[in-house]
Image: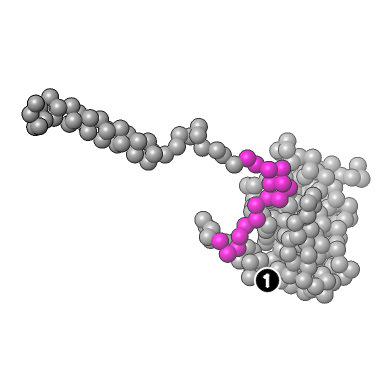
């Protein structure tokens, strides 16, 4: 028998090599192809995620420029910080709120009411409320009303319902502290409340706020409210 391979043997050898190359190519293609959507394991949400909303990292790369309030907060310009609790969050002040100057802190916190991201939403809302709880809050807040009212007006006119609610609560808190002193500025805020009264979602909440404004502002406040919202039902009627 001749030692040289026959033509048939060469063809068989060539065919085997071609098959091996084809199998190897398919294996590489499969290993390089991305996993199908069904094979990707998506992370499951945890119950704690609902209790602790994701906090904005002031040092991370943001998709948009930070707001003025966010910039001040990240630089330590707000003398309090959010403390995460297992059930409830709270603020930790760098010093006693009684020792703080309201100007410009109270105005800065009011500007933060229009924020829509955590922790700024919590810090502005709670900071504004707790600052107004100090003993001499009325004396400190009344001189700031001409600057505070336009800021609150922005929150009340905001398209985001949660921002409106924060602005409304802040307005009631301010009225409880300064009383009739707010009446001269009240007319600038009532247009936004009048619009929200036409919404089923906010009608009851807005009416309750108006009645508290009347309660804290006295008879003069009723005249102002009626001039802007004729359908308002007085607490005295």
Does residue 184 show up?
A: no
Nearer the observer, 74 or 208: 74
The quadrant holding residue 109 is: bottom right
Nearer the observer, 171 or 45: 45
Residue at left 53%, top 60%?
61
Q: Mark 1 highlights which residue? A: 77
Residue at left 71%, top 43%?
47
Quarter in which the C terminus is drawn? top right
Q: Is residue 15 above or below residue 176?
A: above
Most extreme residue toward the right, as rendered?
A: 236
Residue 56 magenta-drawn?
yes
The quadrant holding residue 25 is: top left
Residue 64 magenta-drawn?
no
**Residue 31 at x, y = what percent?**
39, 39
Q: Residues within 10 Å of mark 1 (few under 14, many from 20)?
A: few
Residue at left 74%, top 67%?
80
Nearer the observer, 134 or 42: 42
Provide the secondary structure element on which disc 1 rests. loop
**Residue 145 at x, y = what percent?**
76, 65
**Residue 5 at x, y = what percent?**
11, 30
Q: Is residue 79 above or below residue 111?
A: below
**Residue 179 at x, y = what percent?**
86, 60
Q: Is residue 7 above or below residue 33?
A: above
Residue at left 86%, top 58%?
176
Quarter in which the N terminus is drawn? top left
Most frequent secondary structure within the magenta stretch = loop
Give the magenta part as a residue range.
44-60
């Amino acid at each position: 028998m001749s030692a040289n391979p026959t033509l048939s043997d060469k063809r068989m050898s060539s065919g085997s090599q071609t098959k091996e190359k084809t199998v190897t190519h398919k294996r590489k293609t499969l290993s390089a192809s991305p996993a199908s959507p069904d094979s990707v394991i998506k992370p499951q949400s945890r119950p704690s995620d609902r209790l602790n909303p994701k906090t904005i990292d002031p040092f991370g790369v943001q998709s948009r420029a930070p707001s003025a309030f966010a910039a001040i907060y990240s630089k330590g310009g707000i003398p309090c910080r959010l403390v995460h609790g297992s059930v409830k969050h709270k603020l930790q002040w760098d010093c006693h709120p009684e020792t703080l100057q309201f100007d410009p802190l109270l105005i800065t916190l009011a500007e933060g009411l229009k924020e829509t991201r955590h922790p700024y939403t919590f810090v502005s809302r709670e900071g504004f409320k707790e600052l107004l709880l100090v003993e001499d809050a009325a004396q400190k807040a009344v001189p700031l009303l001409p600057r505070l009212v336009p800021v609150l007006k922005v929150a009340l006119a905001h398209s985001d319902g949660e921002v409106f609610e924060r602005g409304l609560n802040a307005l009631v808190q301010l009225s409880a502290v300064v009383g009739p002193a707010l009446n001269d500025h009240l007319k600038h805020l009532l247009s936004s409340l009048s619009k929200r009264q036409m919404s089923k979602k906010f009608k009851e909440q807005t009416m309750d706020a108006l009645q508290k404004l009347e309660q804290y502002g006295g008879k003069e406040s009723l005249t102002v409210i009626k001039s802007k919202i004729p359908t308002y039902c007085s607490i005295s009627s």
